Amino acid sequence: MSVEVGKRQEGGKPVKELHLNAYAKVNLTLDVGQERPDGYHEIESIMHTIALHDSITLREAGSGTEVVVQDGSSVPTDHRNLVARTAEMLREMFGVTRPLQIELTKRIPVAAGLGGGSSDAAVTLLGLAQMWKLRLDGREMLALATKLGADVPFFLEGGGAVARGKGERITYLPPLPTTWIVLARPRTEVSTAWAYRQLPAGEAGPRPNTAAMVEAMKREDVREVGRLLHNVFEDTIASHHPLVRDLKTRILKGEAYGASMSGTGPTVFGLMANEAAARKTADDLRALGDVDVHITRTFAESR
């Protein structure tokens, strides 16, 4: 979480603000096990944050909790938005009555497998704990993040990590060296709940080699990381959205170490050999039309 603390004037009075960056992620591996009694599935996933990010400003202004989305997108501003739910959860737990305005600028595509909503929630949780001076230790923060969603615990620190359980059991890994990434998102949304329902019952086909991927990351071997990319949702999502498979094929024709789908899709990403390769591949993908393309890179804040 990148934090910038500031104050501005409103009605002649200084207003406290926190400026936060909420970074997206890609799933280097994603495996799914049995459904749990709580309705979630057991997962095992290696994730890594990327430089693409949303911007959030927490401001003591207005009345109650107000969410303002700056980019004019269809992102909801009521309880359906995880940042609003995060604020209300903390209000109820700690009896906070101070006014709050949450200004959200979206850059991470919605329902794209990049974790934007979860990242927004995580940095809002961390930011409000700071702004409201809440006494929360690491274990308590993790428990609250887990209540908000399966990916939220990972975003409390980001970087590289293995997530297990429903996403709350986090083992951090050395982050990758700076690696250029191309993101290609078909202009369609994929619901996570729908994607899980589409998974075939029983054997889900080839599984990621999580142990090998962990070792590759410890060695900072980006070429091997690219070779080991694997997502059990990819074939299923591609059968409904064939553009997913086409995008992966086109990325692999460039100077890519590997390509895969992130999360439950539909975004496909490629780990590229260098910036020039990323830009050339991005231009090739944009020529397809009906796809949004971003160039970014791996990102990890110092811990």
Image (tube, helix red, strand yellow):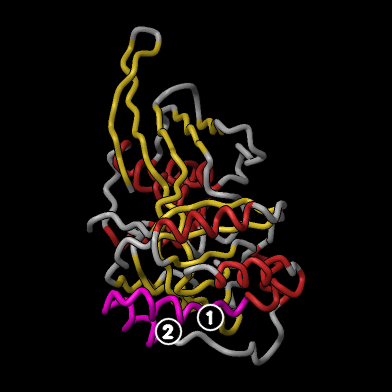
Relative placement, left or right, of 67 versus 303 is: right
Q: Is residue 96 left or right of residue 191?
A: left
Q: Quadrant of residue 243?
A: bottom right
* Numbered disc total: 2
Please give the name of the residue rendered at 67% of the width and 66% of the height, measured from the top-left corner: 193
Residue 114 rendering spot, x and y as whole percentages: 53, 58
**Residue that mark 2 sits on:** 210
* Front-most of residues 140 and 258: 258
In the rendered structure, which segment of residues is drawn in magenta? 211-233
Of 139 and 269, the residue lying toward us: 269
Q: Is residue 143 visible?
A: no
Q: Is residue 8 above or below residue 127?
A: above
Q: Is residue 101 left or right of residue 300?
A: right
Q: Tell me the residue at 35%/14% (across/down).
A: 9
Q: Residue at x 45, y 62 (%)?
A: 146
Compare marks 1 and 2 and give the one earlier in the sequence.
1
Quadrant of the rendered image containing residue 40: bottom right
Say what amino acid the circle numbered 2 marks: Thr
Residue linked to disc 1: 31
Locate the C terminus and report the quarter of the image it occupies. bottom left
Which kind of residue does numbered mark 1 sit on? Asp
171 relative to 121, above or below: below
Q: Residue at x 56, y 77 (%)?
A: 231
Label 1 and label 2: CA atoms lie apart by: 9 Å
Prevailing secondary structure class for the magenta stretch in the rendered image: helix
Contact flag, marks 1 and 2 (Cβ < 8 Å): yes
Find residue 295 and report its horizontal and vertical position in percent. 48, 52
